[in-house]
Amino acid sequence: MASRGYAVSAYIPAFNEGSAKIYGANIQSGVVTSAHIASGTVVAADVKDGAITSAKIGAAAVVAAKVGAGAITSAKLGTGAVVGAKIAANAVTSAHIASGTVVASDLKANAVTSAKIAASAVVKSKIDCEVITGTVISAGVVEAKAHTLGAAPTFVSVVPWLVVGDVPSSTTGLTIYEAAASAATSANFYVGGNKGGVKFKAFVMV
């Protein structure tokens, strides 16, 4: 007897091309896993904006080996996304911080303590300060001495600066000081002494 072909049940719905396509609404949760995706088959062009959220990333799923150099920029980090708990000890070094990127407003109160500063890490070149030498011209007279800090210093220390050849008798009972009655300005600080013609050295810091 000749074949009459395949029987079609009246209960089978008609073919619908839309429902047969593979896209999000047609894929059950958990059906496609990493075991079903060959290495290198999913590239950036295959991923829509916002397609990958934190809920879709397993704990410890993203490691350094999976992040290309320069792949993470500030535009890809949400406000408050990076916290201390997410940064390994010694993960951020000076080589990772561009010059001028960390300013005072980026640091919380008491964020930098002595325990976080390496020995000899803070040197004169990193402090807004000057060392100035000069001479007390007249005894008992407060004299203005110039600095180039551009702001009124908060700390001034003045000491005698004696060199070989100074006559010992001329320095007996010598007093040199910062004049407290004359406030330092963005241009000058003020010194005085009980003897004239004596050299001094001052440390001036903003």
Image (cartoon, helix red, strand yellow):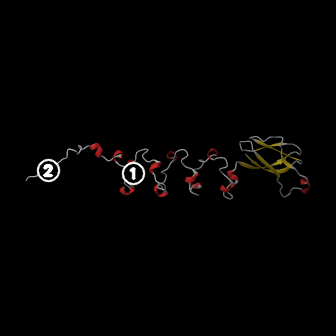
Closer to the camera in the image, 10 or 176: 10
Q: Viewer-nearest of labels 1 and 2? A: 2
Q: Which residue is mark 1?
A: 43
Closer to the camera in the image, 157 or 144: 157
Residue at (67, 49) in percent of width and height: 110
Q: Secondary structure at mark 2?
A: loop
Residue 49: x and y in percent read 42, 44
Closer to the camera in the image, 125 or 56: 56
Residue 83: x and y in percent read 57, 50
Left or right: 62 in relation to 172:
left
Residue at (39, 51) in percent of width and height: 43
Q: Which residue is mark 2?
A: 5
Q: Which residue is most to the left?
A: 1
Closer to the camera in the image, 119 or 140: 119
Q: Secondary structure at mark 1?
A: loop
Q: Amino acid at mark 1?
A: Val
